[in-house]
Amino acid sequence: MRFRIEQRPEPSAAMRIAAPVLASILTLIVGSLFFASLGHDPLPTLYAFFVEPLSSMNGLSEWLLKASPLILIACGLAIGFRANVWNIGAEGQFTMGAIAASGIGLFWPNPDSALLLPLMFLAGMAAGMAWAAIPAFLRARMNTNEILVTLMMTYIATLFLSYLVHGPWRDPAGFNYPQTALLPTGALFESFDPAYRLNPSIFITVIAVLVMWLFTDRSFLGYKMSVSGAAPLAARYAGFRESAAVWIGLLAGGAAAGVAGMAEAAGPLGQLSPQISPGYGFAAIIVAFIGRLNAFGIVLGGLLMSLLFLGGEGVQMTLALPSALTRIFQGILLFFLLAADFFIFYRIRVVRPARDAHVLETARVAGD
Amino acid sequence: MHPRLELRNISKRYPGVVANDDVSLSIQPGEIHAVLGENGAGKSTLMKIIYGAAQADTGEIYCDGNAIAAHNPAMSRALGIEMVYQHFALFESVSVVENIALSASGAFDLPSLADKIRELSLRYGMPIDPHRQVHDLSVGERQRVEIVRCLLQAPKLLILDEPTSVLTPQAVVKLFDTLRQLAAEGCSIVYISHKLDEVQELCDTATVLRNGKVTGTARPKETTSLELARMMVGSKLPEMHVSPAAPSEKPVLEVRNLSAKARDHFGVDLKDVSFDVRGGEIVGLAGVSGNGQAELIALLSGERTHGHYDAIKIGGTPAAGLRPDERRKLGLAFVPEERLGRGAVPSHTLWENAVLTAHRLGTVSKGLVDRRKASIFAAGVIDRFKVKANGPGATAQSLSGGNLQKFIVGREIALAPKLLLVSQPTWGVDVGASAFIRQTIVDLSRAGTAVFVVSEELDELFEICDRLLVICQGQVSPSLVRTSTDREEIGLLMTGRKMSKDRSGDVALQD
Ligand SMILES: Nc1ncnc2c1ncn2[C@@H]1O[C@H](COP(=O)(O)OP(=O)(O)OP(=O)(O)O)[C@@H](O)[C@H]1O
Ligand SMILES: [Mg+2]
């Protein structure tokens, strides 16, 4: 008996639904074996990973708080990914957004102005877009590879932030810690409840998801982008500009990441320090793909990713699992999720050689 | 003796359609066997099953008396089965010789393989430069590469799925000589074509498919093409009506002294091309593929722009610097030669593909795609052009070659253009549908549209065109009136030989 992988004539609709379920089950099985083999009782571990973080109000608040930037950034990135524009520098655009927004927050003459937050929002968005505009310009004009440029720009952004908080923007009253002064209250999102950190910036994400859905699924511009991604020659045939797809794809990602950076600075952080992101910009790439570049899929992907962050921290604290273990477990889940997608487009068939086919079997071996 | 190939009760279904229904046939060594049928009859599906590129749901395949189990293309090649796909299966980003090396089994040596390709392709009358990149080749040239690739393997069974659809008549003659010689040496050949005269000339036996079922067998050499057509279509063929043209006063398309460097150094430079197309007439461009047609068409469609804005005028407006969508606003519609990936997005549905160019016709409003209207538009094209498809929601790649061609031609004609550019309008379309497409193009022109047709099929050009141009080495001849020229003259011009006529006579013809 032999197995063969073959392409399905049509992507399987049933598999689209079954794939994430299958992936989850496989993760639970493999994860349990993995924990068990290392001497950790699987059930309590899985419980601590997935259930405990969500069983308190604070846990729920943290869950959404962390999911929000992931979802927001992934929505922006997915617009580009659909058109084969590979912005992997959202981390840098996030950083620039946070810097620009904090700059306004720190130095605006009237710290009580009601315009302060809206201005910071615009500054964050503009900075993220500006940071993405550089690779967009280089790609559209000089055909440079945006994957490399966006990634490199991330390092520049991170080092620039480091320079600011170690140098010109360092808080004089901050005991020489590399961080800025706290943002004034007028420059902060006020939490829904002082006991928890969740704040209204989450509504920005909700709106972004709806806009993203409208753009990709209903708008003509989104349609053009998907043609550019799926068949560049057809896009040229129809007269859709390739450079437009590049600009829109990168600017959407930059805007989303910049706003996410602003919301982070004006939300849970409240000031700048060298480390402002636990890797949101990179994790969002995975979120975009788990969500199959679809707005509502991205929401689920972001919630899952956020839960993995929380659960990972949780088991490290409550069960004292090493952080490497939690990372491996997160990797297992992501691996199965993305691998299960394969079965939407392909299937495995069992083939049995016929009795009188031994001559041909030899031929096949020679041919393989 | 065992037959070279025997199919027993092959069935294959796709969502919404039975592509092959209990098909049995057998082919002897040295036999040239035609498989005939309308677009969507299931011919390509059957060939893919024989080659192992698709799996039958039920049924058995025997090769030289042995059942083939666990079939796949690698096994086919090991058995000496080679196939030229209808939609070519070449690697775009590497050269011709690398492509051929990739599909050869065993070790190879690129320089000597390149020499062999150059020599063999010349001998077969299908010259190709082994070092060109495949993505720069026109479909005609790609077809040559596919055929040469198969012939190089010295196959025992050769499957040709519409190999001559974009070959010139001269190349077809040479190909047939080669095929006959192969058959005489014992190679069996399965031949698919919608050109019945070719089938009658070449094939010993024929199997006719309709809706996936075998509806008959025939000996083409002893059967008239009318009878063959009737077996395929099951009804009478429509007749063409070409009324005399009444060209408009002003030209709709004016090309003046258009020169352009080829995009890569293997392409052909256009040299000082000038011609007009008036409303109400059909002008054809004849020529061997790879003589600058691709460059000219890209410049006319706007896929490539040009710095001298006046070199191309559409309806009097300088257009050489405009993008395709801007030219479409001037009334241009365009059917490109590649249907998958250029004329249509393979993975998108038909309604989505309708939006590709029909976005001016209300399928987009206020920046949003109107799915309902797009579906209605697509359904209209499907209905009018009798496209065999599982509704507007079917993906473009699930359609048979001829049916996708009908959809794209239908979409562009439905735009009610002032100027229609068509490249290979009936490539891969069955006899009944070709006649319908040609008639529709003629009717469109008689209603006032200017039509410019690029085709390698001289018969087609002679059937519908009012005037003919010939392109050779990037130069376009003065125009010839269809009724006062003949195949011989065009043939000479296609090979670059000058006519004996004096130039003033040609200029007189142009007016
Ligand atoms: N991958 C697929 N998914 C769904 N339907 C398919 C697929 N491939 C082919 N079909 C359907 O099967 C039928 C037969 O298609 P096939 O390509 O074999 O036709 P054909 O005889 O080669 O036609 P043509 O002369 O136009 O090339 C068509 O109705 C087509 O739509
Ligand atoms: Mg076919």
Image (cartoon, coloured by chain):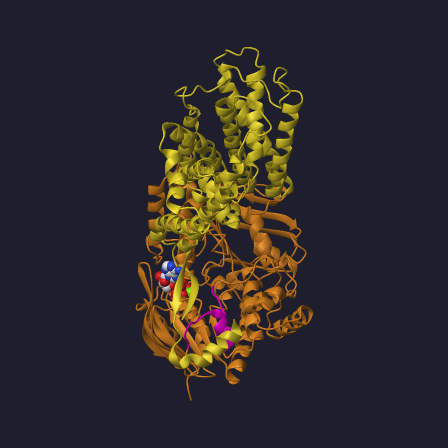
Chain colours: A yellow, B orange
Query: What's drawn in magenta, residue-wise?
Result: B68-86
Q: Is residue A166 left or right of residue B324?
A: right
Coordinates of residue A73 in the picture (x, y in percent): 49, 34
Residue at image position (54%, 65%) is B143
Q: Residue A259's x, y, as percent?
A: 50, 28
Comparing B261 with B75, the one in front is B75
Q: From the viewer's perspective, is residue A199 above or below residue B471?
A: above
For ligand 2, the image quadrant comes to: bottom left
Q: Position of residue B408 (x, y in %)?
A: 43, 53
> Residue drawn at (52%, 31%), measured in percent from left and top?
A255
**Is A162 within the magenta?**
no
The image quadrant where one finds the N terminus of chain A is bottom left
Membership of B71 in magenta stretch: yes
Percent coordinates x, y for residue A353 in the rendering: 40, 75
Q: Nearer the viewer, residue B367 or B240?
A: B367
Please state which of residues B445 and A341 is positioned toward the viewer in this rendering: A341
- Looking at the image, is B377 positioned above or below residue B61? above
